[in-house]
Image: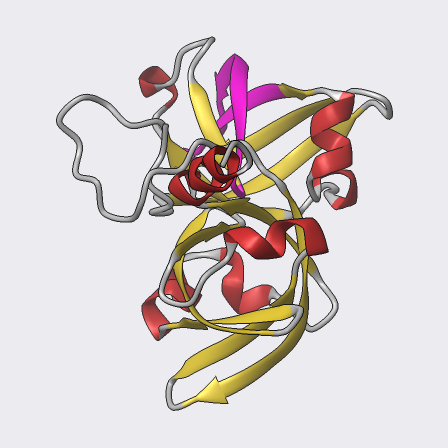
C-alpha cells in the first residue's frame, strides 16, 4: 500500500525482455534499506524487488520483474535506459498518510491532452480510457504516475489537475509533454462504490 507521495526520482539503467521484462532501477534509497520481496511503486506500478546492489555513485540499484499483464496495462513498454520514474516505498505501520490510499494496481493509461501555465503552477488536462471516466470526479483523488493528485474538473471525456511548483521540481512531471501517456489508478473508494451499485 502507498500514498502517492513520491520519495525519490529513479532512473531505469537496464531493461530486457519483451513478453516479460526485467528492469534495473537506480535510486537514492540506501541499498541496506531494501530487501528482496519489498514492494516499490515505480511511477505508480507496484513492483517486487528481486535483487539489490550498491552503485559507485552512492546510489543503489534494485531489480524488478514485470509481467505481460503489467506491460500491457501501463507505460512500462515505453520505458528505456535513462527513463526517469517516480518512486515510493511501501507504507509501514505508523507512517504518515500524506496523500490518499494507493494500491499500485494501475487501471490504465491516460494521455496528456494539454499543459498550460497557471501562475507558477501548471494545469494538465488528461484523456483517460472511457471505461474509467465514471470513477473520476471533481475534487476526488486520483493517482497519476505514482503521484496523489486532486481532480480539478471533469469536462466530457477529459479531466484536469493542477501541479504546484514543488511537485514539478521533485517528480517527473516537469519532463512531461503533450501527447505523453501516464499511469492512472482510480481512487479505491470510487472503484468499490461503482461495484456495489452494479447490484442495486
Q: Residue at x 72, y 41 (%)?
A: 81
Give the main secondary structure, helix, strand or loop, of the magenta stretch: strand
Q: Position of residue 102 (x, y in %)?
A: 40, 37
- Left or right, 56 with reference to 5: right
**The stretch drawn in magenta includes residue 157:** no
- Left or right, 83 with reference to 137: right
Q: Position of residue 191 (x, y in %)?
A: 48, 39
- Left or right, 75 with reference to 33: right
Q: Which residues are magenta?
A: 43-64
Q: Nearer the viewer, residue 163 or 103?
A: 103
Which quadrant holds the N terminus?
A: top left
Q: Nearer the viewer, residue 60 or 141?
A: 141
Q: Residue at x 72, y 43 (%)?
A: 79
Q: Position of residue 199 (x, y in %)?
A: 52, 31
The residue most toward the right is 18
Q: How is the image coloured?
A: secondary structure
Determine whether 50 is above or below 115 in the image. Answer: above
Q: Is residue 85 visible?
A: no
Q: Is residue 95 visible?
A: yes
Q: Nearer the viewer, residue 92 or 10?
A: 92
Q: Residue at x 75, y 32 (%)?
A: 71
- How many marks the image carries: the answer is 0
Amino acid at each position: 500500500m502507498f500514498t502517492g507521495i513520491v520519495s525519490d526520482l529513479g532512473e531505469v539503467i537496464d531493461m530486457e525482455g519483451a513478453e516479460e521484462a526485467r528492469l534495473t532501477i537506480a535510486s537514492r534509497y540506501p541499498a541496506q534499506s531494501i530487501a528482496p520481496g519489498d514492494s516499490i511503486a515505480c511511477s505508480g506500478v507496484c513492483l517486487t524487488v528481486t535483487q539489490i546492489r550498491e552503485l559507485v555513485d552512492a546510489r543503489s540499484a534494485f531489480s524488478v520483474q514485470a509481467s505481460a499483464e503489467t506491460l500491457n496495462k501501463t507505460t512500462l513498454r515505453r520505458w528505456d535506459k535513462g527513463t526517469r520514474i517516480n518512486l515510493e516505498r511501501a507504507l509501514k505501520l505508523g507512517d504518515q498518510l500524506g496523500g490518499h490510499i494507493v494500491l499500485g494496481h494501475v487501471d490504465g493509461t491516460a494521455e496528456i491532452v494539454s499543459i498550460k501555465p497557471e501562475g507558477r503552477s501548471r494545469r494538465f488536462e488528461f484523456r483517460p480510457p472511457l471505461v474509467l471516466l465514471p470513477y473520476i470526479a471533481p475534487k476526488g483523488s486520483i493517482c497519476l504516475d505514482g503521484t496523489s493528485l486532486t481532480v480539478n474538473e471533469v469536462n466530457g471525456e477529459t479531466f484536469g489537475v493542477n501541479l504546484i511548483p514543488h511537485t514539478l521540481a521533485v517528480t517527473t512531471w516537469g519532463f512531461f509533454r503533450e501527447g505523453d501517456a501516464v499511469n492512472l489508478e482510480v481512487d479505491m473508494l470510487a472503484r468499490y462504490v461503482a461495484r456495489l451499485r452494479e447490484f442495486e
